[in-house]
Amino acid sequence: MQYRLDLIVKPAEGALVRVIGMVERRGFVLRDVQATPHADGRWRLQMQVDSTRPGETLRHQLEKVYDCESVTVSAVAAVAADAGVAA
């Protein structure tokens, strides 16, 4: 299953490393990361991850990371691979 996580993170040294480390330690595979700064200095992170585990499990763990101010998780619809086109 693929999930999209939206996080608001404090601009602390090592915050991104702590967040990504938590994702990997919990058995999720990181597929994409995008970061956008807010006017108040915080960062908005969007991550896409894969796992057979529930996304809520990761959300609960990321909420415990000191630098995370908010975390939301949503399931991403799987994109069907092309079946192949005969020439």
Image: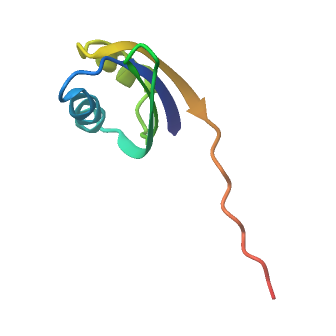
| Quarter placement of the C terminus | bottom right
Q: As drawn, is 56 to the left or to the right of 85?
A: left
> Residue 35: x percent and y percent?
43, 34
Q: Residue at x 47, y 28 (%)?
A: 5
47, 42: nearer the viewer: 42
Q: Residue at x 21, y 29 (%)?
A: 18
Quadrant housing residue 14: top left
69, 78: nearer the viewer: 69
Q: Which color scheme does this rendered protein use?
A: rainbow
Q: Which residue is situated farthest in the left direction here?
A: 13
Q: Residue at x 25, y 17 (%)?
A: 65
The answer to whether residue 45 is above or below residue 59 is: below
Q: Which residue is situated farthest in the right direction here?
A: 87
Q: How many marks?
A: 0
Q: As drawn, is 67 to the left or to the right of 57?
A: left
Q: As drawn, is 73 to the left or to the right of 87?
A: left
Q: Which residue is situated farthest in the bottom direction here?
A: 87
> Residue 57: x percent and y percent?
37, 21
> Residue 37: x percent and y percent?
43, 27
The answer to whether residue 64 is above or below residue 35 is: above
72, 82: nearer the viewer: 72
Q: Residue at x 30, y 33 (%)?
A: 23
Q: Which residue is situated farthest in the front direction here?
A: 39
